[in-house]
């Protein structure tokens, strides 16, 4: 009978729940503290790896010197400057736009004069596999015969992607690229993903264009 | 039932997706390709096993009135832990699963096993049940993922099978998953009916798997059916 009264006493119930929540908070806090450094390292590694792939050889640390700028459309853009021996060898700008399955984030690299060099889309988007990913992913195509023959995939250079590569060598004009007027590649059936890539490249390119056009003092202010 | 039986029942006899039909949301969303299905399945297995273990340990301490909130807190803790661990040590898998990783908290399979099994059974049985159910879930997700990925993009685990590049695009999306899952469930029922016919009995789904045992819809005038 003692148990019955204990089990229905609201104060005891509240106390019990409090203890359970306390223990669980402790477990989560310990995990969060322990995984904090590896998580930061993993995130930094992804950005560093992407920058290494799309920028020419540099000897500074673009990730730690990144500045936040905004595109003329008001989209936030993160700008990385790659330098070698103190001279700028290229820029990379990270921007995002919404696609079919949510946010699509990408990094666009630029030659020092603001011409688009390479576009990559960061992993972690939710575009439809097989449809939207045709626009966004630079995946190494491995076939079953390669696997059987033991052919190793070539990881030395970035795998091609017709849609992303179509922006290479382009400079942003006054108006946004359209399917009809410009050479940029839209994939039929993946309109939303194509638009997302087009948008994010546009945000990055116009932000970099304005950044380069701005006088030096303003750059310092950034 | 022996530990081994508790472990193996998750694969076929009481498979969480194909027989208990639980956890449909992650099943449809993360079985679009085999790798995603595998990552989701393994994350869920970890949570299932961990929460089953802890709940089985505290089952006699928890007052009945607050057992569900307690179980949810335990499950949520495990999900947060697995989320942080994946973010740190398997960032690719973490990115692929996206929102569905934290949503394991509300996966019916996890709470279902906690309430229906771990809260009534010992430590070893609960661990075996959690592991078996989790691996059964993983198995179904990977199978569905392979079929869907193959039909939609002609690949398996991202490797092209050199059949087609543009398959049935719908298979890559939730409706395709629904259609495929429906066909598989129908196939399983057909198989069970065929077996029952051979044995000369009428096929009926096991009583504990349908709603007959549940007392929610039976109003208080009636004696609730034997639940446990």
Image: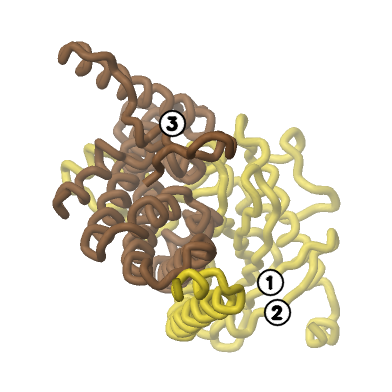
Chain colours: A yellow, B brown
| Labels 3 and 1 positioned on one and the same chain | no
Real-space Cα separation, disc 3 to disc 2, in angstroms: 63 Å
Instruction: Describe residue B202's horizontal placement relative to residue A187 as left or right.
Output: left
Report the chain holding disc 1: A
Q: Earlier in the sequence, mark 2 or mark 1?
A: 2
The correct choice, above or below, for A167 with respect to B13 in the image is below
Real-space Cα separation, disc 3 to disc 1, in angstroms: 58 Å
Disc 2 vs disc 1: Cβ atoms closer than 8 Å? yes
Residue situated furthest front in the rendering = A1
Q: Secondary structure at mark 2?
A: strand
Q: Quadrant of residue B90?
A: bottom left
Please name whichever residue, A178 or B87, is drawn nearer the observer in this view of the structure: B87
Identify the residue shown where x is 63% and y is 54%. Answer: A104
Q: Quadrant of residue A157?
A: bottom left
Instruction: Describe residue A174's horizontal placement relative to residue A28 as left or right.
Output: right
Q: Position of residue A30 (x, y in %)?
A: 45, 84
Please name whichever residue, B7 or B183, is drawn nearer the observer in this view of the structure: B7
Q: Nearer the viewer, mark 3 or mark 1?
A: 3
Q: Secondary structure at mark 3?
A: helix
Residue that carries the numbered disc 3 in the rendered image? B212
Q: Residues within 10 Å of mark 1 (few under 14, many from 20)?
A: some
Residue that carries the numbered disc 2 in the rendered image? A67
């Amino acid at each position: 009978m003692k148990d019955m009264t204990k089990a229905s006493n609201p104060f005891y119930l509240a106390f019990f729940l409090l203890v359970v929540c306390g223990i669980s908070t402790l477990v989560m806090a310990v995990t969060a503290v322990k995984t904090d450094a590896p998580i930061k390292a993993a995130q930094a590694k992804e950005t560093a790896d992407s920058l290494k792939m799309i920028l020419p050889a540099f000897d500074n640390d673009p990730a730690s010197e990144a500045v936040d700028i905004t595109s003329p459309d008001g989209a936030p853009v993160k700008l990385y400057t790659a330098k070698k021996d103190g001279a700028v060898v290229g820029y990379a700008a990270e921007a995002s736009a919404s696609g079919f399955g949510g946010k699509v984030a990408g990094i666009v690299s630029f030659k020092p004069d603001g011409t688009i060099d390479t576009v990559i889309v960061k992993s972690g988007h939710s575009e439809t596999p097989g449809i939207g990913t045709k626009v966004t992913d630079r995946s190494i195509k491995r076939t079953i015969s390669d696997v059987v023959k033991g052919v190793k995939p070539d990881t030395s250079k970035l795998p091609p992607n017709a849609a992303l590569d179509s922006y290479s060598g382009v400079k942003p004009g006054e108006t946004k690229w359209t399917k009809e007027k410009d050479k940029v590649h839209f994939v039929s059936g993946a309109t939303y993903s194509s638009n997302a890539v087009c948008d994010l490249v546009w945000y990055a390119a116009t932000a970099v264009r304005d950044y380069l056009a701005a006088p030096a003092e303003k750059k310092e202010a950034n | 039932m022996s530990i081994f039986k508790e472990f193996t029942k998750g694969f076929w006899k009481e498979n969480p997706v194909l027989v208990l039909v639980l956890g449909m949301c992650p099943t449809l969303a993360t079985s679009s390709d085999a790798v995603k299905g595998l990552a989701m399945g393994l994350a869920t297995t970890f949570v299932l096993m961990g929460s089953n273990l802890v709940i089985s340990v505290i089952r006699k301490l928890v007052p009945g009135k607050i057992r569900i909130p307690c179980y949810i807190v335990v499950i949520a803790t495990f999900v947060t832990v697995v989320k942080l661990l994946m973010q740190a040590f398997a960032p690719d898998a973490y990115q692929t699963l996206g929102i569905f990783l934290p949503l394991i908290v509300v996966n019916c399979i996890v709470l279902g096993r906690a309430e229906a099994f771990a809260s009534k059974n010992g430590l070893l049985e609960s661990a075996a049940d959690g592991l078996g159910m989790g691996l059964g879930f993983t198995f179904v997700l990977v199978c569905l993922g392979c079929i869907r990925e193959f039909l939609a993009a002609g690949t398996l685990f991202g490797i092209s099978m050199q059949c087609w590049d543009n398959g049935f695009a719908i298979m890559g999306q939730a409706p395709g998953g629904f259609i495929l899952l429906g066909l598989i469930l129908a196939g399983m029922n057909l198989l069970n009916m065929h077996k029952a016919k051979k044995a000369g009995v009428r096929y009926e789904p096991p009583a504990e798997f349908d709603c007959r045992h549940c007392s929610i819809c039976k109003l208080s005038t009636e004696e609730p059916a034997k639940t446990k």
